[in-house]
Amino acid sequence: MVELQGGTLRVESSIGKGSVFTCILPTRIVDDAPRAAALTSKPPTTGATAARLDGYEILLAEDGPDNQRLISHVLRKAGAVVQVVENGQEAIDAIVAREDQSAPFDMVLMDMQMPVRDGYSATKEISQRWPELHVAAITAHAMSTDREACINAGCCAYLSKPIDRAALIATCAELGNHAQALSTVREECAAEAAP
């Protein structure tokens, strides 16, 4: 069961001393559709209380030039650093390139319907190879079955087009907060494990 979920199970046993079982399972910060729905249903923030995305590195995978310009403009205005690619394969390639430079993205905004490689396929690969990297779906399809398909592909948030500026920024801020919290926990665990 553990291996089917992409994890490992290890047993260490000593006669007369006992046994130690170690189970390691890959997880996601957000793992269900109701949580993802909550991300997009928050009331918009305005003025001085609006979320900021200062310093967040965001990969935007979107094939429509108008959407590329609009979404990247909104994100940059909120303080994010944005790299734009045109399809799912370019998104995978950009993540690999950043990984090689030890400068990972904080999150990915993924259009689900793109040429060359769609967002569903790319998100599945991202979820398997980089489970700590959050992917938010951006799609013109707003049916509940579409939302479910995005979540099943590995997205942890869902934004429907046309994109609402406040919802976009709030979702990115939420994903960034989760990524920072996860990074802090990993650093603390590594420090505790160090001799």
Image (tube, rainbow, N blue to C red):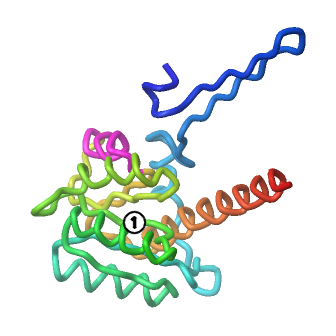
Q: Is residue 142 left or right of residue 96?
A: left
Residue 195 lies, with reference to residue 85, above or below; the image says above
Quadrant in the picture for residue 16 = top right
Quadrant in the picture for residue 178 = bottom right
- The furthest residue to the top: 16
Q: Residue at x 68, y 21 (%)?
A: 11
Could you say where residue 130 lies in the image, as x and y percent from the top left?
45, 54
Q: Residues within 10 Å of mark 1 (few under 14, many from 20)?
A: many
Q: Secondary structure at mark 1?
A: strand
| Magenta segment, prevailing SS (helix, strand or loop) | helix
Tell me the quarter of the image containing the C terminus. bottom right
Q: Is residue 149 left or right of residue 1?
A: left
Residue 82 lies, with reference to residue 181, above or below; the image says below
Magenta segment boundaries in residue numbering: 145-155
Quadrant in the picture for residue 13 = top right
Q: Nearer the viewer, residue 56 or 104?
A: 104
Q: Which residue is mark 1?
A: 108
Could you say where residue 159 lies in the image, as x and y percent from the top left?
36, 60
Q: Residue at x 45, y 85 (%)?
A: 81
Q: What amino acid is labelled 1 in the image?
A: Val
- The furthest residue to the front: 15
Residue 44 lies, with reference to residue 143, above or below; the image says below
Residue 181 lies, with reference to residue 147, above or below; the image says below
